[in-house]
Amino acid sequence: MECTVSWTGETGASSSMGFMAETGSGHAFMMDGAPDLDKPQNGGKNMAPRPMETVLAGTGGCTAYDVVLILKRGRHRVTACSVKLESTRAEVDPKVFTKIHMHFTLKGHQLSPSAVERAIAMSHDKYCSASIMLAKTAEITTSFEIVEDDRGA
């Protein structure tokens, strides 16, 4: 796996803290720093997600992927899955994540709470490399809700 991240550089009379990421799979996305009100020349322009937001989003994608795949392999009729991640970071550098709560909302036909709980646990204990890595510095907690989808009947 590889990724190249490049600073977008100076833009006219001002500096930028924007970065372009290009992944080995051929995709690209922007990242930007937060505006610095005290020293505008040092801050970002709030034009894209912060790098740590992309870490959090990637973790959500990793675990949601696992949960859906585990449920589908178990022949559970899941039709939608989202996960909302809320985090706390350390006050001082390095400002690592110290707490992350993941709330899953799954939609499907007669989804079993025990199957959903098992899928989430398997993701966090065995498969999701992102959340397992972040668990080295952050306390990770999870919760979930199931929404019945009668269309799957």
Image (cartoon, rainbow, N blue to C red):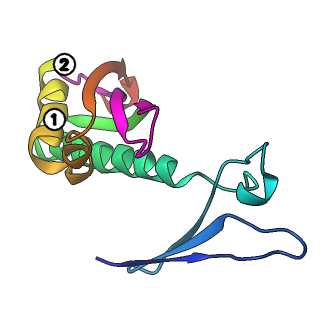
Q: Nearer the viewer, residue 101 or 114?
A: 101
Residue 109 placed where, x, y %?
29, 26
Q: Nearer the viewer, residue 30 or 103?
A: 30
Residue at figure coordinates x 30%, y 50% from the top left: 62
Snapshot quadrant of residue 80? top left
Label drawn at residue 119: 1
What kind of element bears circle 1?
helix
Magenta stretch in the rendered image: 88-112
Label drawn at residue 110: none
Residue 140 placed where, x, y %?
26, 29
Q: Which residue is mark 2?
A: 113
- Mark 1 vs mark 2, CA separation in Å: 10 Å
Predominant secondary structure, magenta span:
strand
Q: Is residue 2 above or below residue 64?
A: below
Snapshot quadrant of residue 115? top left
Give the quadrant of the N terminus.
bottom left
Q: Nearer the viewer, residue 84 or 139?
A: 139
Snapshot quadrant of residue 95? top left
Which amino acid does the dot numbered 1 rest on?
Answer: Ala
Q: Is residue 76 above or below residue 66?
A: above
